Image (tube, rainbow, N blue to C red):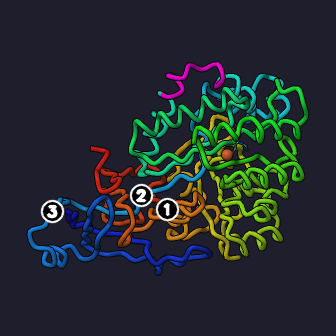
Amino acid sequence: MKLIGPFTQMLTMRDLPLRGKIPDESLEIISDGGLLIDGGRILGLGRFADMENQYPGVDVEKITGDKVLLPALVDCHTHLCYGGSRAADFAMRNAGKTYLEIAENGGGIWSTVEQTRSEDEEVLLGALMERVNFLLSLGITTIEIKSGYGLSLESELKILRVIRRAQSMTPVRLVPTCLAAHIKPKDFSGNTEEYLCYVLEVILPRVKEENLSNRVDIFVEETAFDKGESKTFLLRAKSMGFDLCVHADQFTVGGSRLAVMVGAKSADHLEAVTEEDIAFLAQSDTVATSLPGASIGLGEPFAPARKLLDSGAILAIGSDWNPGSAPMGNLIAESSILAAYEKLTTAEVLSGITYRAAYALNIHGIGRIAVGMRADFAVFSTHDYQEILYRQGRLRPSAVYIDGKNILS
Ligand code: NIG
Ligand code: FE
């Protein structure tokens, strides 16, 4: 058992609502706070001085200087395991080339599939670890990571196994998701429906057998899979015991409605979501995940986060870090930019990258500072929590704790 503190400000987020808007006045800020930790979990919290009196003789980890404590952050949507680069795509897109022209010039998702398939496993692992460590340096201790750049049994398994190896090398909580249904690979001889059958009958059983992931994602889009075949796919994956999430409404609509209908944990992207589908999401337990990094990477509008919150939806924010649409990978910078454009309160943004993001991953026990929760938190060297989003990614934590242990030092 140990007592850590005093923290100039401790943001607990413990009583904030799961869904809808949150005024900043609702944020609980404990000044000169202390945290009592035992067995990796939070046993108590309050004013540091009071807790010192309450637990005489307890081990104390003394904090000096101005420090703000937040629940550690959660990135609930990434594609971190990939080979190569798509810098040329970015340049071509900015120079006015269309999606088709970029694909014809050797770019697009398929080019990352080729670069990932041919990449040495050790190189993939090294690159993945570097990205995980960058996210950790932002205070993120839980990261969802999708496959989806393999698109064959062998290469999807290779990616998921690399993620598993990464997990054995870091205390950061990695949450693998099988996105074999990203696009139909160019070298698959059948149609999209046949490819989805192949994923269901060949890839997913192996994923289950090797216990590589319990989550399945699909890209519902005109250029990927249509709503009808996606529905069949998602229901069958669900009946195999997988949690579902959907790349939905990025360019054309229908995916989020489908996500709600099949009981997906989250519908992600939503740049093109309609008013009607916002209302539908708001009445469901499916988390609406905004991915500002993809809007910034593509120069496209943001998902209507303000409207989603005002309607009562559960809004999470993910980085979508991938080599194509979202190369930035800085969840704090992206969330802060989203806040400025969509007019989100600090409480709404921080909820979207902590306990609401954890809910999207169906993970309980992280994302809030409360008794019984895991002692995962980030400590920033500042006197005011508002500095964190204000500095748009420049302010990084000086310490990050997982299960009560500082893993940055
Ligand atoms: O989430 N939208 C589909 N998939 C990714 C992009 C993947 C890529 O371009 O490599 C996304 O934006
Ligand atoms: Fe994505």
Relative to the observer, which residue lies in front, 52 or 27?
Answer: 52
Amino acid carrying mark 2 in the image: Ala
Q: Residue at position x 65%, y 57% from top?
A: 290
Q: Quadrant of residue 150?
A: top right
Residue matched to label 1: 354
Mark 3: amino acid: Val
Whether label 1 touches label 2, CB < 8 Å = yes
Q: Which residue is mark 3?
A: 60
Secondary element type, mark 1: loop
Q: Tell me which label, 1 or 2, sits earlier in the chain.
A: 2
Q: Secondary structure at mark 2?
A: loop
Relative height, residue 27 to residue 62 (above, below): below
* Rendered location of residue 244, percent (x, y): 69, 55
Majority secondary structure of magenta residues? helix
Q: The magenta stretch spans which residues?
A: 116-125
Does 122 appear in magenta?
Answer: yes
Across and down, in percent, residue 14 comes to: 43, 74
